[in-house]
Image: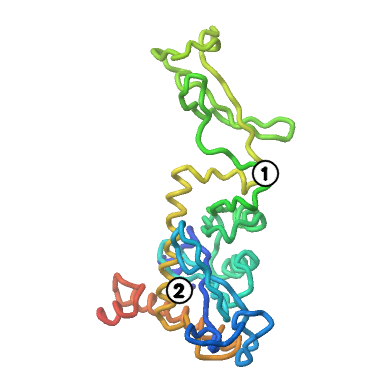
């Protein structure tokens, strides 16, 4: 990773974190197995004492909520969303929540590749205040995480600009801070127009001042998590880069790591680490050989 960073292939400006399930080598994970209560916490697999009971989504469709239980582990991978290469990986039992290890993964990855000023991308599973605050305060970066509505006790920042009495979108006109609160100021869209006319002939239009029209304010939440405008084009285009995490996980599973043949936690972690190192080694060899394709070993073999 350090060599790829020095070559300029990885700059960690946009990083994404995601996890993928790793099935343990146990008969409880066999769909043809007729073992009773095979996904009960009280019936732990004897062949792998380190694995844990986890759950993962069996469908990516928003209108189709299907989940599957499994015994095994999770591979948490921090991916560079531009090159599609892994920056840091961590293997945990399957019952460890993704959000609980995010801060530690960022700290460990920062020791290898500087993450200052990065944009951190993750799904709703990482919608936790500590992650937002760490990205902003420690790494001076931005967080691009969808809001998990059931965790929101406070009202988030409404999307879009305010609407004036004439039904027009008002323009942003700076921010003001007073009494410990920050407010976004909005002004009339025809404020400085010489030919514009207020459609509703508002009383503030002919106020005799140079800057005419209505002025409204919106209080910006002090919580960084709630102050993010997730409906703006900037957020949507940046968050779209997170698909590189899913693409890398697909390549990772193609290496045969989706189902393990070892039966303890240390061996599982070692195999996962070797698989990620192999992906980096292929990328480094492809770059040094002048190949344009560094994501698949098959492509590298053809060019070699």
Residue 191 shown left or right of residue 127 in the figure: left
Query: As drawn, which residue projects farthest toward the left?
Result: 302
Q: Residues within 10 Å of mark 1 (few under 14, many from 20)?
A: few
Q: Which residue is mark 1?
A: 154
Query: For the image shown, how many numbered marks are present on the structure?
Result: 2
- Residue that carries the numbered disc 2 in the rendered image: 3
Q: Position of residue 287 (x, y in %)?
A: 34, 73
Of residues 118 and 149, the one drawn nearer to the viewer in this rendering: 149
Residue 180 lies left or right of residue 215; in this view the side is: right
Indicate whether 208 appears above or below 161. Answer: above
Any part of residue 3 in sight:
yes
Q: Secondary structure at mark 2?
A: helix
Q: Residue at x 50, y 90 (%)?
A: 261
In front here: 156 or 190? 156
> Measured along the vertical axis of the image, is residue 290 above or below residue 30?
above
Q: Tell me residue 26's x, y (percent).
A: 55, 88
Q: Is residue 299 above or below residue 201?
A: below
Secondary structure of residue under mark 1: loop
| Mark 1 vs mark 2: in front | 1
Q: Pinpoint residue 25: horizontal percent, then vertical percent.
A: 53, 88
* Chain-order first, disc 1 or disc 2: 2
Residue found 74% across the figure and 31% down from its top: 179
Point out the image quarter for the C terminus.
bottom left
């Amino acid at each position: 990773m350090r060599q790829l960073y020095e070559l300029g292939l990885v700059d960690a400006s946009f990083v994404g974190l995601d996890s993928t399930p790793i099935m343990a080598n146990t008969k409880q994970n066999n769909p043809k197995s007729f073992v009773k209560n095979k996904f009960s916490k009280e019936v732990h697999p004897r062949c792998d004492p380190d694995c844990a009971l986890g759950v993962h989504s069996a469908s990516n469709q928003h209108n189709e909520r299907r989940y599957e239980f499994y015994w095994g582990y999770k591979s948490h991978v921090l991916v560079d969303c531009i090159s599609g290469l892994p920056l840091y990986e961590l293997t945990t039992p399957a019952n460890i929540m993704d959000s609980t290890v995010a801060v530690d993964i960022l700290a460990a990855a920062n020791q290898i590749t500087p993450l200052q000023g990065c944009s951190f991308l993750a799904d709703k599973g990482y919608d936790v205040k500590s992650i937002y605050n760490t990205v902003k305060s420690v790494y001076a970066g931005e967080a691009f995480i969808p809001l998990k509505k059931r965790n929101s006790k406070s009202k988030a920042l409404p999307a879009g600009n305010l609407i004036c009495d004439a039904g027009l979108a008002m323009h942003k006109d700076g921010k003001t801070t007073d009494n410990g609160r920050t407010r976004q100021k909005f002004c009339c869209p025809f404020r400085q127009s010489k030919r514009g006319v207020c459609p509703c002939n508002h009383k503030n239009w002919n106020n005799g001042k140079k800057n005419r029209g209505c002025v409204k304010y919106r209080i910006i939440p002090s919580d960084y998590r709630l102050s993010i405008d997730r409906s703006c084009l900037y957020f949507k285009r940046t968050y779209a880069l997170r698909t590189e995490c899913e693409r890398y996980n697909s390549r990772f599973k193609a290496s045969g790591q989706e189902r393990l043949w070892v039966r303890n936690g240390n061996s599982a972690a070692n195999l996962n680490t070797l698989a990620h190192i192999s992906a980096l080694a292929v990328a480094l060899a492809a770059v040094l050989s002048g190949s344009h394709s560094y994501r698949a070993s098959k492509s590298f073999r053809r060019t070699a």
